[in-house]
Image: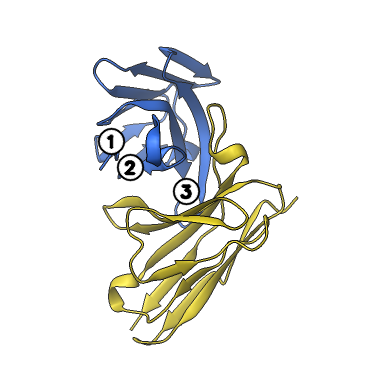
């Protein structure tokens, strides 16, 4: 499977702290995306980083990508209780018959305590 | 725009029953897909479509059928429900087949229980 794997599975922090989640994947990719899922809801896209990019920012989010290590990290700075959710990385396959398939990891459950 | 709409939100089936999960999008997206989400398993791709009339299998297609007669609709059919199909099902769409710079838009999910 080309599924990404997030680490840690669960993360619990206080408001104001930074939260870092990691994602590893197995094969070549076109891009890597991070999604957020609030309890009982659908997934919402957060940020996309292309395979030729190394770092990307969006508000309090910072994503890095290391294609040589097949890994990515998502940093949420100055976390808030409202950031409590599950976070998933998803990889878009590099080509061939799997082009267009988006593969998800198992997710990191982030809890931010007030 | 409504985005991606899934119906029903909840469903209980008896083993052996069949049913169709509906998915509709109003964004004129070419690419649509169905995922199932199970505890500790993340999202797994069931079937996907890159345009009207074109469908293909994902990671876990057994027990499910799909068709894509229009750009807007992508129904998922359970032929003979089994308890192993108890899950939360998500439909997603994206423009131009989840291309280089596109994101997937998700519905709110259908929670299916097979007893």
Which chain is assigned blue?
A
Q: Which mark is residue B21?
A: none
Q: Secondary structure at mark 2?
A: loop
Residue at point 50%, 39% (across, down): A82
Q: Position of residue B16 (x, y in %)?
A: 36, 87
Instruction: Quarter of the image for the C terminus of chain A: give it.
Output: top left
* Label 2, residues with CA under 10 Å away: few <14, some 14-19, many ≥20: many
Q: Nearer the viewer, mark 2 or mark 3?
A: 2
Residue at mark 2 shares a chain with residue at mark 3: yes
- Between disc 3 and disc 1, whose residue precedes? 1
Camera-side residue of B83 and A62: B83
Residue at point 41%, 86% (across, down): B17
Residue at mark 1 shares a chain with residue at mark 2: yes
Quadrant position of residue B60? bottom left
Q: Chain of mark 3?
A: A
Residue that label 1 marks: A6
Residue at point 26%, 15% (across, down): A68
Residue that label 3 marks: A38
Quadrant position of residue B99? top right
> Marks 1 and 2, Cα distance to the nearest angstrom?
6 Å
């Amino acid at each position: 499977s080309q599924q990404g794997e997030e680490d840690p599975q669960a993360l619990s922090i206080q408001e104001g702290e930074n939260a870092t989640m990691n994602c590893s994947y197995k094969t070549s990719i076109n891009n890597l995306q991070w999604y957020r899922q609030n309890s009982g809801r659908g997934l919402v896209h957060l940020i996309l980083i292309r395979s030729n990019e190394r770092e990307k920012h969006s508000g309090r989010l910072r994503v890095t990508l290391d294609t040589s290590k097949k890994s990515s990290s998502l940093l949420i700075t100055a976390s808030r209780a409202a950031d409590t959710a599950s976070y998933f990385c998803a990889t878009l396959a590099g080509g061939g018959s799997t082009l267009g398939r988006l593969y998800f990891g198992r997710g990191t459950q982030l809890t931010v305590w007030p | 725009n409504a985005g991606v709409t899934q119906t029903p939100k909840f469903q209980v089936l008896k083993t052996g029953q069949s049913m169709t999960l509906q998915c509709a999008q109003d964004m004129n997206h070419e690419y649509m897909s169905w995922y199932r989400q199970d505890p500790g398993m993340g999202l797994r791709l069931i079937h996907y479509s890159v345009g009207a009339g074109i469908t293909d299998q994902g990671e876990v297609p057994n027990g499910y059928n799909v068709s894509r007669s229009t750009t807007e609709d992508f129904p998922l059919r359970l032929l003979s429900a089994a308890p192993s199909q108890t899950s939360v099902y998500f439909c997603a769409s994206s423009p131009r087949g989840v291309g280089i710079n596109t994101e997937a838009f998700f519905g709110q999910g259908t929670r299916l229980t097979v007893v």
